[in-house]
Amino acid sequence: MSKSLKRVKTALDAAGLTVEIMETGADTKTAQAAADVAGCALDQIAKSIIFKGEDTGNAILFLTAGGNRVSAAKASAVAGQLLGKADAALIRAQTGFAIGGVSPIGHLNPIQAYLDPRLTAFDTIWAAAGTPHHIFPISPDRLIALTGATPADFTES
């Protein structure tokens, strides 16, 4: 088990959740690929989109429904600062995950997080489990509780 996958499993266990992490056997770097493997709707995939806060230099996490795109202007307004592109080094340093497998939980460092309200329309959503080959199911309410994410409108219309 990779260190990244182990951190996600540890975070789920610490929260008292019995969750079966699915090994996909396929690359699930895209939301559509993850939805196909999970057998769910595209919008049931919680994408972890990370920007760099230009004021703080910190990574900021936007959990977005699979079919939605983050609006940079709306996301900046929600975060209260101009957002820029987060490079792979910042993402790895703050979260401990590589691009393509960033989980919403199990980060190395605390991260400010926001959640696309579209995700709350489902009983179960799926998120990356720290690798491009692992995903896990969770209720939106549990995900909000674990991440401390604030529901906000930050997607393109």
Image: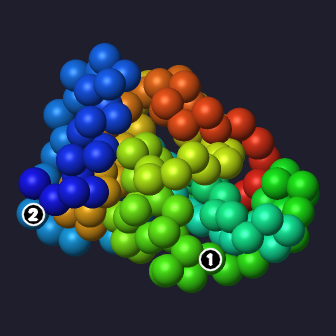
- Can see residue 156? no
Q: Residue at x 73, y 70 (%)?
A: 57
The amino acid type, in three-letter code, at marker 2 is Gly
Residue type at numbered disc 1: Ala
- Give the answer, above or below, for where 29 lies relative to 131: below
Splitting the image into 4 quarters, where does residue 130 fall? bottom left
Please say whether residue 92 is visible from this viewpoint. Answer: yes
Q: Residues within 10 Å of mark 2 (few under 14, many from 20)?
A: few
**Picture disc at residue 28:** none
Residue 86 - label: 1
Identify which residue is drawn at 22% across, 22% down: 18
Alpha carbons under labels 1 and 2: distance apart: 28 Å
> Quick check: 67 left or right of 70?
left
Give the vertical position of 10 relative to 60 (above or below): above
In this rendered view, identify the residue nearer to me: 147 or 90. Answer: 90
Q: Which residue is mark 2?
A: 25
Q: Disc 1 on helix, strand or loop? A: loop
Q: Position of residue 117 (x, y in %)?
A: 67, 38
Q: Along the line of sight, which residue is nearer the eye, 26 or 15?
A: 15
Considering the image in quadrants, where does the N terminus appear?
bottom left
Q: Residues within 10 Å of mark 1 (few under 14, many from 20)?
A: some
Residue depicted at x 31% and y 17%: 16
| Type of colouring | rainbow
Nearer to us of marks 1 and 2 is 1
Q: Nearer the viewer, residue 102 or 152?
A: 102
